[in-house]
Image: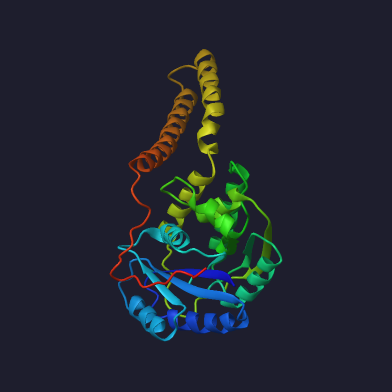
Amino acid sequence: MERLAVISSVFNEEEVIPIFFERFAKEREKLGDDLDVRLFFIDNGCVDNSLDLIRELRATHNWVNVISLSRNFGYQGALICGLQSVEADGYIVIDADCEDPPEMLPEFVKYWRKGYDVVYGLRRGRHESWILRLTRGIFYRFTRMIADADFILDMAEFALITRRVRDAVISTASTHPFVRAEIAYAGFTRKALPYDRQARPAGKTHYNFFHMSRFAIAGILTSSTFPLRAWGYFVPLLAIVGVISGLFLNASSKAFQVLIALEVGCIMIMIMICCLYVARIYKDQIQRPIYMIDERKTCFDQFVK
């Protein structure tokens, strides 16, 4: 019997967990008896009643599990925890907020059984302002344009991956994982399933502009070295412009002063970008764990081969 682990990161989702579970349980029944499907909630430092609700579900459904982290280690850290902790043949990542519909899971499994290694949801639209939608579109396309390796457009972590893709994802030595980038880097066969992201049925989103900005910067730093390499081309150009302006412009002229100010500004931006990469290298060298599991709150059963 094939083993399918469904991994769902949870952070203060007490209002939406019952809704998510009801919808997920209906889809699980459609998958048949020849597939061992288990749900693994990753308690990412919840401070509401989410963990208690999950424990109640586990008491009545033996296929429900919970891995509790010692604090909030971020969304990516929670996903890596789930992928590393569970041994299965296939893995589905889905958020408990119901923005990614559980009703797509049977379709994911259908294409998995056809031999695809990655079956992912391709976002066509979502319930958000046009400004956010435009910003996301620019981010994804800019990141793909500068990425060192393949970067899948309009893909999040809502996907089914095989064990060999999972092994490639968790093999990264970085302490700053970016799961969707690792999935793209791994390659293998892929199938995109377009869908419209739904509105939350309850609760509030945990992502504000600050979190999304941090996420975007982390995605670019993980996926590309272009911000560093670009300065290798741009700095000589700055030097040439500086020499030419020194020969033909008066040092006291406004044009010369503006040019110098622009060059200084560019150099400051270059230093800032270098600092971001150096900070990542420093944290990677410290080799702190990406996550820590609180064994006292954790209740989960491994699949039996």
Residue 43: % across, % down: 37, 69
Relative to 155, 96 lies left or right: left
> How is the structure coloured here?
rainbow
Relative to 189, 301 lies left or right: left
Farthest left residue in view: 296
Residue 294: % across, % down: 30, 65
Farthest right residue in view: 114
Residue 16, can we see it?
no
Q: Residue 13: which quarter of the image?
A: bottom left
The residue located at (68%, 71%) in the rendering is 110
Instruction: Name the one closer to the observer, 287 or 123.
Output: 287
State whether residue 157 is above or below residue 219: below
The residue located at (62%, 54%) in the rendering is 152
Instruction: Name the one closer to the observer, 71 or 220.
Output: 71
Farthest top residue in view: 247
Q: Residue 274: which quarter of the image?
A: top left
Q: Residue 162: which quarter of the image?
A: bottom right
Residue 27: % across, % down: 58, 81
State whether residue 201 is above or below residue 77: below
Farthest front residue in view: 305
Instruction: Name the one closer to the observer, 120 or 130.
Output: 120
Quadrant location of the N terminus in the rendered image? bottom right
Residue 28: % across, % down: 57, 80
The residue located at (53%, 27%) in the rendering is 232
Residue 290, can we see it?
yes
Q: How many marks?
A: 0
Instruction: Name the one closer to the observer, 244 or 138.
Output: 138
